[in-house]
């Protein structure tokens, strides 16, 4: 355990000493701030924009960071031969993968905290001016869901980067994320075409992609009801279920990454 | 007490490129390293030294054969606790400082904070980086990285220290410092296995040497046994009227007669030196025997591989 913590802290330290990351976070922050003057209409309308753009910004930049930092996590260590000194230390190879993953989640947590804090600040100013409710409880749940989403994306990135180059891994991970966002549409589409066996095969293959729609629900229909962060949003029970799905999916991806990494030659 | 390192017919074949062309890096390597000896792993570039050491360190898996360290299989965590390793041309996280890197490595051994601090400071001093501990590694020179690599290999006070080309990237003074450090480690009761392609490194400090050429073990043993004690020739330097001449006298010839003849002719004897086989001669002999440079054997090997 202490070994995984040590490896995670080192990964986290690398990330926070990396200037590119701050740049990305700055873009996310800028997006939220810039949304305010551009939004039209009454003040409480502006709050809707802040919530929508803020959450979209957190999702977009969270996913981008997860992909671009995630695909380098393992690859860079092998490419730069830093693993050569690490593997002969009394660690298991799977502990290395876990340490990298946990360190990445710590990094994402900090990025999420920065972007959320900014969004909260903007919202609180707007609340003062309008006396309209900020709906912060719903926003917290929405952000928790987004964190589950980037966890899944990170796990996929680590899986690909355990055996492939960053460019390929990045393309595959982004591809998985995009497909994962359209799973319901694709499911509907594929349910109608082809023969029965091919439909079953396709449905099975679809299971390989993460159902990322579970995590970004504002404006969607859940259980026959429309949910939004502006009004009635999903409860913590839903968040818990979605988190379980995310954990299971990430667990499978990581387990695969550990198996691949454990059998590799470091040349 | 069994050997600390046992390599038993290790073999490694890499598959290269799109066509998975086979490259045999290590063909057949067996040796043991005994308690408290300095064991030199000697061979020209591309002989398979690094590949062999990587197999022992669990970085790559042998294609066939097996190895044990402290009597345990490779990658055994208990065995790894007693082991230190310096990779060839080491590279470490450039966003860390030297001290931070040693701290990280200490954590992986479960050392507490006080022990980590103490050992890191001591080791930085020992490898001559006492004043560079706070500097970021991206500002380290190659020689400094090499020294830090040795420091991190010693963070757990290991019983067995494995060093891949520990003197590379260092100037003559640095090389001597590392040689002294290896000798000190032995005096502390530790066992050292190191690789090098430089003869003088092993000549001075090794108890036993393994010679690796073209992926095959040519010789293992104490240096004195590897070197033929046979007299090669005697070099005699004579001088007369300020002009000197060098004579190579074959071992069967009578040196005494030659000298008295020279003295009678009014020549002055400057030196008489019997030449026995040096490590360099042995090296050349082994490389010639294996014919790694020319490639008759390699071509033969390639052809048979393509067939199989
Ligand atoms: N990853 C690899 N892929 C293909 N061939 C390799 C690889 N690593 C080493 N080799 C080959 O194996 C041989 C031995 O290399 P190496 O063990 O590095 O030798 P040494 O350390 O004695 O200089 C060389 O011919 C080298 O080209
Ligand atoms: Mg080498």
Image (cartoon, rainbow, N blue to C red):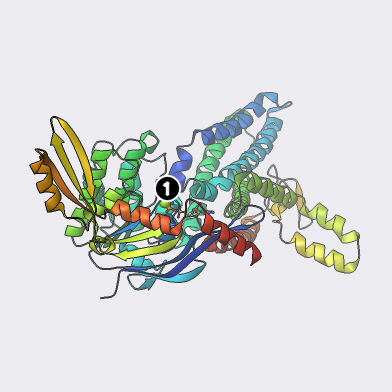
Residue A65 vs B234, above or below: the answer is above
Measured from the top left, where is residue B81 in percent x and y?
33, 63
Ligand 1 contact, mark 1 (Cβ < 8 Å): no
Nearest to the observer: residue B1 or residue A103 = B1
Q: What is the crowding at mark 1: few (fewer than 14 residues within 10 Å), some, or many (at least 20)?
A: many
Helix, strand or loop for disc 1: helix
Task: State the residue position of label 1.
Answer: A10
If the image is split into quadrants, where does the N terminus of chain A sit? bottom left
Question: Is any part of residue B118 visible from this angle?
Answer: no
Measured from the top left, where is residue B200 in percent x and y?
27, 49
Q: How many marks?
A: 1
Q: In the image, is B120 to the left or to the right of B97?
A: left
Question: Is any part of residue A191 visible from this angle?
Answer: yes
Residue that extends furthest to the bottom in the rendered view of this protein = B1
Nearest to the observer: residue B228 or residue A82 = B228
| Residue at horizontal 50 percent and vertical 33 percent from the top | A19
Measured from the top left, where is residue B41 in percent x and y?
34, 58
Residue A117 vs A7, above or below: the answer is above
| Residue at horizontal 83 percent and vertical 67 percent from the top | A200
Q: In the image, is B270 to the left or to the right of B91?
A: left
Residue that extends furthest to the top in the rendered view of this protein = A37
| Residue at horizontal 43 percent and vertical 55 percent from the top | B47
Measured from the top left, where is residue B287 in percent x and y?
41, 55
Q: Quadrant of residue A183?
A: bottom right
Q: In the image, is B293 to the left or to the right of B170?
A: right
The chain containing the residue under callout 1 comes to: A
């Amino acid at each position: 355990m202490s070994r995984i913590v040590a490896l995670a802290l080192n990964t986290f330290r690398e990330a926070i000493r990396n200037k590119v990351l701050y740049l990305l976070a700055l873009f996310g922050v800028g997006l939220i701030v810039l949304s305010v003057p551009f939004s039209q209409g009454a003040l409480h309308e502006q709050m809707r924009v802040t919530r929508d753009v803020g959450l979209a910004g957190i999702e977009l930049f969270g996913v981008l960071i997860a992909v671009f930092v995630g695909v380098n996590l393992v690859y860079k260590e092998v490419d730069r031969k830093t693993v050569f000194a690490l593997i002969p230390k009394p660690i298991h190879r799977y502990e290395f993968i876990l340490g990298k993953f946990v360190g990445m989640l710590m990094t994402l947590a900090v990025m999420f905290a920065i972007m959320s804090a900014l969004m909260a600040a903007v919202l609180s100013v707007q609340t003062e001016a309008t006396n309209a409710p900020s709906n912060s409880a719903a926003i917290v749940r929405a952000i928790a869901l987004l964190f589950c989403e980037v966890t899944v994306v990170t796990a996929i990135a680590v899986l690909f980067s355990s055996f492939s180059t960053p460019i390929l891994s990045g393309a595959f991970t982004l591809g998985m994320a995009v497909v994962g966002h359209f799973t319901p549409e694709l499911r509907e589409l594929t349910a109608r075409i082809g023969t029965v066996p091919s439909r079953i095969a396709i449905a099975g293959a679809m299971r390989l992609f993460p159902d990322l729609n579970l995590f970004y629900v504002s404006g969607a229909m859940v259980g026959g009801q429309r949910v939004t962060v502006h009004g009635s949003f999903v409860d913590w029970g839903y968040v818990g279920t979605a988190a379980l799905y995310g954990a299971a999916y990430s667990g499978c991806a990581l387990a695969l990454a550990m198996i691949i990494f454990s059998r590799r030659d470091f040349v | 007490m069994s050997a600390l390192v046992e390599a038993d017919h290790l073999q490694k074949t890499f598959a290269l490129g799109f066509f998975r062309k086979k490259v045999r890096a290590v063909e057949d390597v067996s040796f043991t390293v005994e308690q408290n000896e300095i064991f030199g792993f000697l061979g020209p570039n591309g002989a398979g030294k690094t590949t062999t050491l990587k197999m022992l360190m669990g970085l790559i898996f042998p294609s066939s054969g097996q190895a044990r360290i402290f009597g345990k299989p490779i990658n055994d965590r208990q065995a790894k606790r007693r082991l230190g390793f310096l990779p060839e041309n080491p590279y470490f996280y450039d966003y860390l400082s030297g001290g931070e890197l040693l701290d990280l490595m200490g954590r992986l051994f479960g050392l507490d904070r006080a022990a980590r601090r103490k050992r890191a400071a001591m080791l930085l001093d020992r490898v001559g980086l006492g004043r560079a501990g706070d500097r970021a590694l991206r500002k380290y020179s190659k020689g400094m990285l090499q020294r830090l690599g040795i420091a991190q290999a010693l963070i757990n006070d290991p019983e067995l220290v494995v060093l891949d080309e520990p003197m590379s990237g260092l100037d003559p003074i640095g090389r001597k410092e590392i040689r002294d450090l290896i000798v000190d480690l032995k005096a502390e009761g530790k066992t050292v296995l190191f690789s090098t392609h430089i003869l003088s490194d092993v000549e001075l400090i090794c108890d036993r040497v393994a010679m690796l050429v073209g992926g095959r073990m040519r010789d293992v043993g104490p240096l004195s046994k590897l070197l033929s004690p046979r007299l090669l020739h005697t070099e005699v330097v004579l001088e007369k009227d300020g002009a000197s001449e060098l004579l190579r006298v074959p071992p069967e010839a009578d040196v005494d007669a030659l000298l008295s003849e020279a003295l009678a002719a009014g020549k002055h004897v400057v030196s008489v030196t019997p030449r026995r086989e040096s490590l360099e001669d042995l090296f050349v002999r082994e490389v010639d025997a294996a014919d790694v440079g020319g490639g008759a054997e390699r071509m033969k090997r390639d052809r048979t591989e393509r067939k199989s």
